[in-house]
Amino acid sequence: MSLRHGLLGLLSYKPMTGYELDKEFKDTLAFFWSAKASQIYRELDAMQQNGWLSSKRVIQEDKPNKRVYSITEEGEKQLKEWLINYNPFEGGQKLRNPFLLRVFFGGEIGKAHTIKLLEDAQEFTSKHVDVLAEILDLFDSGEIVDDELSIDPNKQLYWKLTAQWGEIMNKAQLEWLDKALTILKEEN
């Protein structure tokens, strides 16, 4: 996924400020894609120059002025083309995982540091599994509603599918972490 397409997807729900996009990104897409606020604002500028977005400045009296972004017809076209024309083999499977890179070079810092790295990851991942389980429970109970985005129930189904993927992937990571820790702790 490109960051641009993730932002276009969020803006397809409703116009938002950069701040609102950053918050919504962290609340929804951050389970499988990360972006810093500076990256989001840089992409918004580029997309506006490409004609994918329009923006209007809103003057506020008690708060700083804000810029509200809206997806244009060209932006909707770009989003739909990107969604439809996906090729899973395009560009190969690009994986950037700083955590695994650290594990790979763990021999440089010693077993104790690598065990600590794995234990920290285990704790973080376990919490992430719990959060995803709570989200999935909300989907199953019909309680997940984002009034701010006015999400069509048919679109929520796709959000649920990504949450299920996240839960399974994180459980697999926990299984691997258990095995890796066992190996490191048993080895003399």
Image: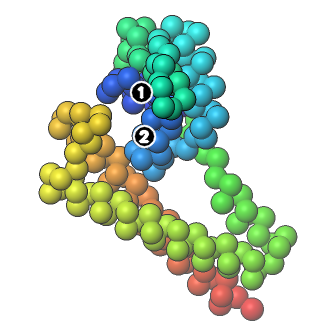
Q: Amino acid at mark 1?
A: Met
Percent from the top left, x then y, of residue 172? 45, 65
Q: Label 1: which residue? A: 16
Is 177 located above or below residue 100 in the figure?
below
Q: Residues within 10 Å of mark 2 (few under 14, many from 20)?
A: some
Question: In the drawing, does residue 94 fall left or right of residue 7?
Answer: right
Q: In this orientation, which residue lies closer to the viewer: 161 or 20?
A: 20
Considering only vertical position in the picture, is 145 above or below 133?
A: above
The quadrant holding residue 133 is bottom left
Q: Which one is earlier in the sequence, the residue at label 2 or at label 1? A: 1
Between 149 and 75, which is closer to the camera in this rendering?
149
State the residue lying farthest toward the right: 108
Label 1 neighbour load within 10 Å: few <14, some 14-19, many 20+: many
Q: Nearer the viewer, residue 137 or 161?
A: 137
Q: Give the numbered dot on residue 24.
A: 2
**In the shown orientation, is residue 65 left or right of residue 74?**
right
